[in-house]
Image (cartoon, rainbow, N blue to C red):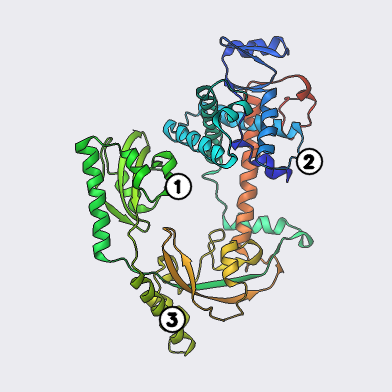
Amino acid sequence: MALSLISCLSSNLSAQEIINDEVKDATKTSDSVLKTVGAKKIDGVAAVVGDFVILDTDIDRTILQLKAQGASIEGVTRCQLFGKLLEDKLYAHHAIQDSIVVSDAEIRANVDYQVEQFLAQSGKSMDELLAFYNKPDERSFREEMYEINKSNKLASEMQNKIVDEIEVTPEETRQFFNRIPEDQRPTFGTELKVSRIVIEPKTSEEEEQRVIDQLKQFRVDVLENGSSFRSKVVLYSDDKASIPNGGLYTLNRKKPRMVKEFRDVAFSLQEGEISEPFKSDFGYHIIFLEKIRGQEYDVRHILLIPKVAESAVLAAKEELERVRQRITDGEITFEDAAREYSDEKETKSEGGFLINPVTQDYNFELTKMDPELYGQIQNLKEGEISLIQTDRDHTGNVKFQILRVTDRVDEHVADYSRDYLKIKELALNEKRFKAIDKWQTEKILDTYIKINGEYRDCEFTNNWLKK
């Protein structure tokens, strides 16, 4: 529990400032609790890491935030929390040195979302929120949250940069496995393969054209009548997750995000341009390109999902009933039926077999299976075909499916041939951990770090005191 709490601290609120060289010089001559940053005085400077300071109140506020979230901090020491803050600031400092750029619009949109979520979930007012974080007004509170979110984003991007290009070869995987003593090799839980056939109700051509025409009218209203694109997002978009951000997403040409159709249209636009309506697996979109910053594109979009008629829902269920009957009667195999009838693109060509997103093979370990999928197959016997199940797709529309479980393998000690992909992932993680450890060791020595007061007595896993 302690480790999981520490790993999530980057999302917690804490005070911070970017400091200048004068402050660094001041910390060399005094460990007093009063430091000056520009014209602002700060009490309780616990540490300086590169261009950042960490305050005593950072740790206090982190503890308050964890308690406010209902998390237990039993077993988590102030030194552990402090160590995590040191790591975050080290990453953020070197992200700046390496000229890593983060999206200002995305960060501010994230702050807006965090504030709205806190108010909605806690039932507190803005005044109560300000009192909780001891802030005089909303503006100063949001600015502090902006700096915190920016620092956290820089830290995250720096970590990604360190490990992004790390890979392991088959030989490295073999050597990793052979280094593990036989009596210490990992045990993998019961595994099985899951396959399914999905049939989705079809929308009518008339309904799809209605959606397209509505999006075209939105485009005209913004370009020719001066309407606000963001307002139309709030009023009409079916992408509920992006509504608090005004439909904003930041895309990077080097790091694919969103479906291909969305990316292709977004990267074809010029600043201030709005796309024509286009279709993806999620529905129909229009995109407004707000800003281009090198490889990053700030875009807003409106998504409309065509409605499905009740008659189409009934027809889809009846079709799947006929397919299931053909399989149980032996007229067609499950695999061939999936290839012929299933509407799920990801599994159709695989004969209905689901691909494990972690291991990229067909095997699923029961103890690590998605709870929703486990609930759908937990009562199935080997080779049994489920009754028709009603489910929802990523747009919220109803769909129907039948499932089957095959090739069950009981819990077993890791076997190199059978479990190669899992072993490869373990080897990759070890290599990434070593890269992170090596980077931290080198950068700690190369970075100005000053730790004050009681925190010098902490037992750190890293050499923050440079002894």
| The disc label shown at residue 313, or none | none
| The disc label shown at residue 75, or none | 2
Q: Nearer the viewer, residue 15 or 443?
A: 15
Task: Locate residue 243, reporting x and y percent.
Answer: 41, 43
Residue tagged 1: 241
| The disc label shown at residue 321, or none | 3
Decide: few, some or many residues near mark 3? Use Cα within 10 Å; few <14, some 14-19, many ≥20. Answer: some
Task: Locate residue 309, reporting x and y percent.
Answer: 33, 67
Q: Nearer the viewer, residue 350 or 184?
A: 350
Vertical order, 300 against 57 (above or below): below
| Residue type highlighted by circle 1 | Ala
Q: Nearer the viewer, residue 105 or 253?
A: 105
- Element type at mark 3: helix
Sequence-earlier tag: 2 or 3: 2
| Spatial CA span between label 2 and label 3 | 54 Å
| Spatial CA span between label 1 and label 2 | 35 Å
Task: Locate residue 333, reporting x and y percent.
Answer: 46, 83
Residue pictured at 27% horizontal, 60% vertical: 208
